[in-house]
Image: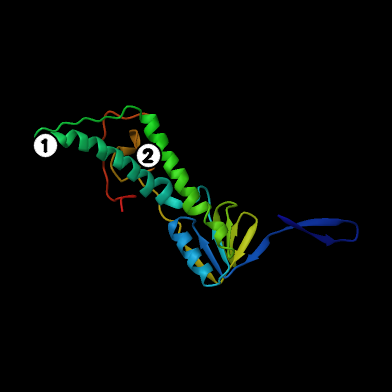
Amino acid sequence: MTQQTKEDDCCTIPVATTSVNEFDVAVIGAGSAGFSASITAAEAGKRVALIGHGLIGGTCVNVGCVPSKAMIRAAEAIHGAGAAKRFSGVSGAAQVDDWAALMAGKEALVAGLRQKKYADLLPEYENVTYIDEGTATLVEGGVQVGDRLIRAPKLIIATGGRPALPAIPGIADVPTLDSTSLLELETFPKVWCFSAAAISGRS
């Protein structure tokens, strides 16, 4: 935070001010949609503020498409081996031998793609300024991010979504998993019970 001084008869009083940053376009959300919008604007010669918070890359690479498909492909491999007996003279078997290793492999894939497809991409666009200094708040005159006021005539909100518990009586009284926490399990559960109303990361 910058400081301005105000002269008085007897002393100098520090007055806190907010630093102002001017851009042509401000994009809130550093996921795939936010990146696409920022790059498109930058290629058109616009000065872009890309405002993120937390892990860069958004839903798809961190908790959606990439990790879910990694686990789905592992499940398909096990299912395919078990289904081999459908063919005469063929047998097969597969199982999860090391759940921790499987999860670690999934996390390594996520981290690698997050770095390659998002973090390493930013330096290629000089017109894009990445800002991760806290949550973004819409205020009069722009977007407040920490101590910075981002001003731009064009604003794009690409914050994505988050999992929500369905309105099922008693669901709050039992252990539950959503599409994010399901991908973070440290031990392989013996019994599964799914209730789903939409698809996340399966495109």
Residue 7 relative to residue 129: left or right: right
Residue at horizontal 37 percent and vertical 39 percent from the top:
183
Q: Is mark 1 on a helix, strand or loop?
A: helix
Most foreground residue, 21 or 60: 60
Residue picked out by circle 2: 183
Q: What element carries label 2?
A: helix
The one nearer the camera, 194 or 45, is 45
Q: Residue 105 carries which label?
A: none
Q: How crowded is mark 1: few (under 14 residues within 10 Å), some or many (20 or more)?
A: few
Q: Where is residue 43 in the image (x, y as percent from the top left)?
A: 51, 69
Residue 67 on image: x %, y %: 38, 44
Q: Is residue 67 visible?
A: yes
Cα gap from disc 1 to disc 2, whole angstroms: 31 Å
Task: Point out residue 118 in the picture as x, y percentages from the top left corner.
Answer: 49, 53
Going by the numbered disc 2, the residue's amino acid type is Leu
Outermost residue, front direction? Answer: 89
Left or right of 18 in this view: 126? left
Furthest toward the right, the residue is: 10
Is residue 185 in view from this perspective? no
* Tally of marks: 2
Q: Which of marks 1 and 2 is in front?
A: 1
- Report crowding for label 2: few under 14, some 14 to 19, many 20 or more residues within 10 A (C-alpha): some
Direction left: furthest residue: 88
What residue lies at 42% left-to-right and 35% top-to-bottom?
Answer: 104
Q: In this view, does 101 lie above or below 163?
A: above
Mark 1 or mark 2: which comes first in sequence? 1
Name the quadrant containing residue 76: top left
Say which quadrant the N terminus sits in.
bottom right
**Identity, as a three-letter code, of the amino acid under mark 1:** Arg
Give the numbered dot on residue 86.
1
- The location of residue 135, given as percent across then percent down, is 55, 53
When the figure is inspected, residue 174 is found, relative to residue 27, above or below; the finding is: above
